[in-house]
Amino acid sequence: MGTIFRSEEMSLCQLFLQSEAAYACVSELGELGLMQFKDLNHGVNAFQRKFVNEVRRCEEMERKLRYIEKEIKKEKLKIPDYGENPKAPAPKEMVDLEATYEKIEGELREVNTNAEALKRNFLELTELREVLIKTQNFFSAHRHEMGSLVHDAQQALSQDEVGFAPQQSVQLGFLAGCIPREKLPAFERMLWFACRGNVFLRYEEIQQPMEDPVTGDPVFKSVFIIFFQGEQLKARVKKICEGFKAALYPCPDSPQEREEMLKGVSTRLEDLKMVLNQTQDHRHRVLVGAQKEIRTWIIKVEKIKAIYHTLNMFNFDVSHNSLIAEGWCPVRALEDVQMALKQGEKTSGSTIPTIIHPMKTRETPPTFFRTNKFTKGFQNIVDAYGIASYREVNPAPYAIITFPFLFAVMFGDAGHGSIMFMFGLWMIISEKKLLAQKSDNEIWNTFFGGRYIITLMGLFSTYTGVIYNDAFSKSFNIFGSAWRPHYEESLLEVPDIELTLDPALFFRNSTPYPLGIDPIWQLSDNKITFLNSFKMKTAVILGISQMLFGIILGIFNHIHFRSVLNILVEFIPEVIFLLSLFGYLVSLVYFKWITFDVSQASCAPALLIQYINMFMFKYTADGGDQKCNPQLPFYTGQQTVQTILLVAALACVPVMLLVKPFVLRSRHNKKLRMRGRLGAHSTDALIPNEIIGENPSTSQAGDSVPAKDISVNTEGTTTSLLPDDDFEDDFEFGEIFIHQVIHTIEFCLGCISHTASYLRLWALSLAHAQLSEVLWQMVFSLGLSMDIPWFGSVIVFVLWMFWANLTIAVLLVMEGLSAFLHTLRLHWVEFQSKFYVGDGYSFNPFSFKFVLDIESLEDIK
């Protein structure tokens, strides 16, 4: 609980790595994943760094592996995932890996080039065969029509565009070929207009689709035959065919030659098909061999590339025999880091040990929380608002309970909550199987990532649904009703009579209902009035309680950062202000519930009027019945108590507003005077941390001053040197005063607006219940009320399907998302603003797991 309640303590470490052991040591640290390195070469161009050539070699290997992976997927082979996590290979193994990848890539490219050429040849021969077959069939089937065709051609071509020539015997020529089916209509129109109707086109579709030699997609084509007369028309027809990318094939004039050519083409096709099958089998064998190793290869290359990227962040010492690195590491993990470095030294065979020592600094460390798959979702919700400042109280452990509970207050329905709970529970039980599928559906991945949140929200919604006694807009009647009418049976038998149950007369006993709301309220006409009052007051109580809890959490920050001033002038006045005004309102609610029973309900004072009169200092009832007036006080001495509380709340405002800025200015002036006295004796004097301010390792973000020098004394201890020009200029009284004014105004006005904001708990709960009731009455209850024999069951089933779909789509998905967003706002604004700064930055260690996860996300995109 300690590491999630407050971020882990971090240490800035400096490492001295021997050149021959640096690669192995960084590899071990990548497997450990607990070291965030700083870029010591941030001013150096990426192409001028030491290991840029190695990074380029890794990128080239990545390119080859992507090509191999694409070919494997193109072959529709599934890449197995055995969950292996091989270690990063040694630098000397890069040559072997490069040779292996280059060999496979070259072999695949050669096979693909040959296969493409063979497929293109096969396509051409297939089209030629179809042209010969279709042409032979055409001439055989239209032999008797050829005479009339020639006669028509003589009439049409007797006077063409060349001029008026004497009529002579017409010798028709023809061209045959293939064209894509979708281009045929435009091709026919172009022939007609370009040749002025002096050509004759005949075509027939090829039934089986052709395969594109490049993409492998099916292509539908048609065989055409064009008849023409003269070389000029022949040239024009060829140009049109070229423009439409129609393939022309030689077709002999005589049937015997066409028959012989067809036999030769068929023989070549059979031989080509055999060669294609052998080529495809060879390609398949190469891909199957790479299929088993491709994932391991990818992991190895990614690790090598990540290591060299990290090494590019290091500096060389003067002798260039060792590398110097700096990075953040959790204090608890220092021993693990040292063990990883020793393992790296052992792997590399280095005899010189790696040196690691913590550094003192005034830089703000990163924020690191150790989470598991259960707490990670809630931590992500908090981090979406802002990363916690270093060592600040983390709201995530409390959100594990408060988040699903506030959601359930708005989504209180035992039926809908049970469905949501079972859906989340199914995702948890089937977690391993669903993870193995690696879906790329973003919506599904969002739901699956929040499976534990959904489960808890469903469980809490079931609980609040039992409290509200509401399940699909119906009530449970487990304990019976506490109302017992005493009307005579004759009166109850009168049709269409409306009777009223007076709680003073018909309530069975004065004990509370065993669990939740009495089921009789589901049938009452004033159900909404009763539930409105109950849920509204409950929302106010929950809201003020959570805001008070947030303020109390703030004291843990003040104690940890040793800020007594914040406790005295912020925490205590804030608690007094909130309890004096709004805590008192909660006490009035409970006082009214406890003091007034059903017999006194009509004469009970009105809470709203009493609260308004508190600020108006009005304590006299004007007119009306002085024994039953909503303006009458609740108790004796109410005026004195409320006046004291109001004065105390108002007195806290100037304390929060003025005290802290002036105290900080007084402290700052005192430090300047002390620094001046020390500087008069020695300009190089060391000033202890107690004089500078708070401990640098525990100071809040924005309160620390970055150290510029580190001095190591003869005893080995490290002492921070005071910067020469930073300390005096960091304190700006005007900025601090304005910040405090804004903080005070935000808190005081926020207490009012945030209390009103919590009323969304009541509003959304009412809306959800009413929408569920409307959906039941207007859809499903219609089928249940029909008195139809056997066909009524069909109607009920259809209406049930319609009602179930609307329930899931509207009440579960849309209403659930709405309640989720409102709960998110209550935590981010109303709760976390009371104590949470969220000004930190996340701890992003050098981790192979993180690198590989990023790569997998990029592959999905």
Image (spheres, helix red, strand yellow):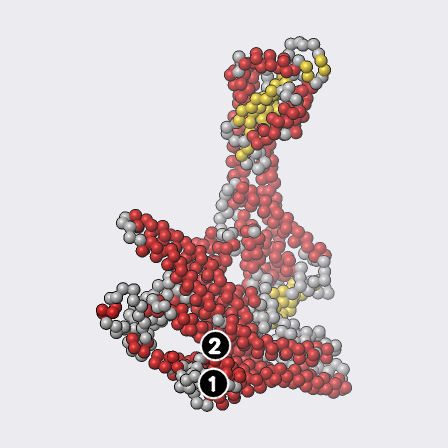
Instruction: Where is residue 652? Give x, y as percent.
Output: 57, 84
Q: Compared with residue 580, is residue 371 higher up or lower down, i.e. above or below? A: above
- The residue that appears at 56% across and 30% down in the rendered structure is 181
Marks 1/2: CA distance?
35 Å
Quadrant of residue 602 within the rendered picture? bottom left
Pick whichever, 55 or 381, lies toward us: 381
Among numbered discs 1 and 2, the one appearing first in the sequence? 2
Instruction: Where is residue 286? Give x, y as percent.
Output: 54, 40
- Disc 2: which residue: 545
Q: Secondary structure at mark 1?
A: loop
- The residue that appears at 49% across and 45% down in the rendered structure is 78
Instruction: Where is residue 553? Give x, y as percent.
Output: 52, 77
Q: Look at label 2 and name its amino acid.
A: Ser
Q: Compared with residue 688, is residue 813 higher up or lower down, i.e. above or below? A: above
Pick whichever, 300 or 64, lies toward us: 64
Q: Compared with residue 736, is residue 419 higher up or lower down, i.e. above or below? A: above
Badge 1, how many Cα within 10 Å: few under 14, some, many 20+? few
Task: Please give the label number shown on residue 622.
Answer: 1
Instruction: Where is residue 660? Give x, y as percent.
Output: 63, 83
Q: Look at label 1 and name its amino acid.
A: Asp
Pick whichever, 740 or 446, lies toward us: 740
- The residue that appears at 47% across and 75% down in the rendered structure is 540
Q: Secondary structure at mark 2?
A: helix
Badge 2, how many Cα within 10 Å: few under 14, some, many 20+? some
Q: Horizontally, is 461 left or right of 392 in the view?
A: left
Look at the image and tell me whether residue 412 can be seen: yes
Q: Nearer the viewer, mark 1 or mark 2?
A: 1
Q: Horizontally, is 748 left or right of 531 in the view?
A: right
Task: Please give the label number shown on residue 363.
Answer: none
Task: Evaluate if marks 1 and 2 touch, with contact meaning CB atoms under 8 Å apart.
Answer: no
Q: Compared with residue 685, is residue 768 higher up or lower down, i.e. above or below? A: above
Look at the image and tell me whether residue 335 can be seen: no
